[in-house]
Image (spheres, grey):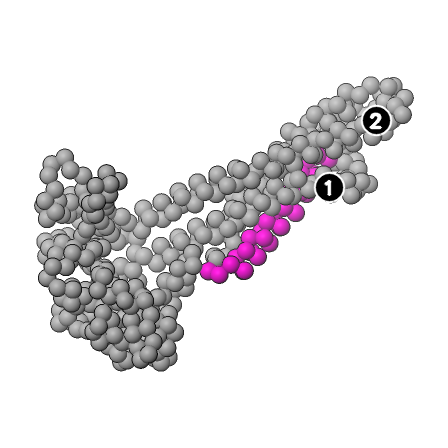
């Protein structure tokens, strides 16, 4: 055991001395590994940065809130059908689903697609109808003023809760609470400004206006068929499956769906949305990294070629070592360690370059999330580069170990 440890230490020392003696060639040998690891880490850092940012955004949503959204199958889309959830559906569920602690909705309508006006400024923004409980579901808290209250919805007040970007877009005062803006040809008084959320994938999350959902529905008229997204949180101890089944029955009756017809709505939770995001970005990362990872194999072949040349150049040295009593195992270990060290050194430099490149991309591209490298990516990089060193360094190491000492000493 002791002799084996000494042999490993001596073999490692000899390998490091050989790398130092041929510094330029060693650096060029690492080049393929450096490029491969840098490319993989750049891809992983950018994709994982996106995943982390999206998950942070989803974390702001209450995990126990379930959304009901319209769902149109491909077959229905092909025949021109488009599923909808209406304001009437929302009111029916709110009256009949007593198992829900909160049940709120989000409504969109073309009437307000023209955006908002203030003075001589106009801006096309997202105008959404909602109510008080929406604040609890999506944690939309005011920085100034207040959010929509129950009495605003009950009395169909013309009030608006705006995202902070609206202040800049419409050139509103720093504190616009109490100011009036025009939406869909009607005047609305600003009652509050939301906390800033920032951008996601270049999409401004602060560019929106909320008004009472009853006001939006009333202004659109009795024939309103605008889409509504419904959100609810169940009371503690309520059976979720039974409640979802009850909601399904009610909506199928309201939509007059026959037996055998699929639902034209679907349920979604924050956890499910997060799982879908993780699945998508995970697949994208794996595919892209796999393609880029081919360059690592090319780099490994480069390591093997250089090491084979090194064996040929050091044939006389190998012969001398064997003549002095060096075992084939010691010779093989020296070359194998040399290949692994070169690969690991290349992996370390590639990791630094990859993270630097991802950080640079995040800096120069607007709204790009910060680069993020998870621990598993670092471990995988070093594990894979070590494996490349072992696999592609094995052939040169075996060749060196098998050299005949007499013939090696005669080599010119």
Tell me residue 341's x, y (percent): 70, 38
The stretch drawn in magenta includes residue 8:
no
Q: Earlier in the sequence, mark 1 or mark 2?
A: 1
Q: Residue at x 60, y 46 (%)?
A: 38
Q: Horizontally, is 336 left or right of 49 in the view?
A: right
Categorize mark 1 by other alpha carbons within 10 Å: few (<14), some (14-19), many (20+): some
Marks 1 and 2 close (CB-CB < 8 Å): no
The residue that appears at 18% across and 52% down in the rendered structure is 85
Would residue 288 be found to the left or right of residue 106 on screen?
right
**Residue 136: x, y in percent?**
26, 62
Is residue 357 on the magenta stretch?
Answer: yes
The residue lying toward the viewer, choosing from 299 and 140, is 299
Residue 167: % across, % down: 36, 74
Residue 219 vs 32, above or below: the answer is below
Q: 318 left or right of 216? A: right
Q: CA distance from mark 1 to mark 2?
A: 22 Å
Q: Can residue 191 be seen at all in this image of the molecule?
A: no
Q: Can you tell which quarter of the image residue 304 is in?
A: top right
Left or right of residue 152: residue 41:
right
- Badge 2 marks a residue whose secondary structure is helix
Picture residue at 54% right of the left edge, 55% below the top: 361
What range is drawn magenta here? Answer: 338-367
What residue sits right under mark 1 in the picture? 28
* Quadrant occupied by the C terminus: top right
Residue under label 2, please give it: 315
Dot label at residue 239: none
Residue 282 vs 196, above or below: the answer is: above
Q: Nearer the viewer, mark 1 or mark 2?
A: 1
């Amino acid at each position: 055991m002791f002799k084996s440890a000494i042999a490993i230490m001596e073999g490692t020392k000899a390998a490091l001395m050989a790398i130092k003696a041929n510094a330029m060639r060693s650096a060029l040998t690492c080049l393929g590994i450096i490029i491969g690891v840098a490319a993989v880490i750049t891809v992983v850092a950018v994709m994982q940065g996106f995943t982390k940012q999206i998950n942070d955004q989803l974390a702001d949503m209450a995990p126990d809130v379930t959304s009901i959204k319209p769902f149109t199958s491909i077959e229905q889309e092909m025949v021109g059908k488009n599923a909808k959830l209406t304001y009437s559906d929302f009111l029916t569920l709110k009256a009949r689903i007593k198992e829900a602690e909160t049940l709120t909705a989000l409504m969109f309508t073309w009437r307000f697609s023209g955006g908002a006006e203030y003075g001589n400024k106009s801006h096309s923004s997202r105008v959404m109808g909602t109510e008080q409980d929406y604040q609890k579901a999506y944690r939309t808290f005011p920085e100034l003023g207040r959010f929509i209250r129950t009495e605003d919805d009950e009395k169909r007040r013309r009030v608006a809760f705006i995202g902070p970007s609206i202040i800049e877009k419409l050139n509103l005062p720093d504190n616009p609470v109490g100011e009036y803006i025009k939406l869909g040809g009607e005047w609305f008084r600003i009652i509050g400004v939301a906390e800033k959320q920032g951008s996601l994938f270049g999409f401004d999350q602060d560019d929106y206006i909320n008004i009472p959902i009853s006001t939006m529905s009333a202004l659109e008229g009795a024939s309103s068929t605008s889409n509504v997204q419904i959100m609810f949180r169940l009371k503690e101890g309520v059976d979720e499956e039974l409640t979802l089944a009850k909601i399904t029955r009610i909506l199928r009756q309201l939509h007059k769906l026959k037996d055998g017809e699929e639902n034209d709505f679907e349920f979604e939770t924050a956890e499910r949305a997060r799982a879908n995001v993780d699945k998508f970005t995970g697949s994208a990362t794996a595919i892209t990294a796999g393609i880029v990872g081919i360059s690592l194999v090319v780099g490994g072949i480069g390591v093997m070629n250089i090491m084979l040349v090194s064996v040929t150049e050091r044939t006389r040295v190998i012969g001398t070592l064997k003549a002095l009593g060096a075992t084939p195992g010691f010779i093989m270990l020296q070359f194998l360690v040399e290949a692994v060290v070169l690969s690991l050194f290349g992996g370390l430099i590639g990791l630094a370059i990859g993270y630097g490149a991802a950080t640079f991309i995040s800096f120069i591209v607007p709204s790009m999330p910060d680069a993020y490298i998870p621990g598993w990516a670092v471990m995988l990089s070093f594990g894979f580069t070590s494996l490349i060193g072992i696999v592609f360094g094995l052939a040169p190491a075996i060749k060196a170990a098998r050299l005949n000492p007499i013939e090696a000493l005669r080599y010119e």
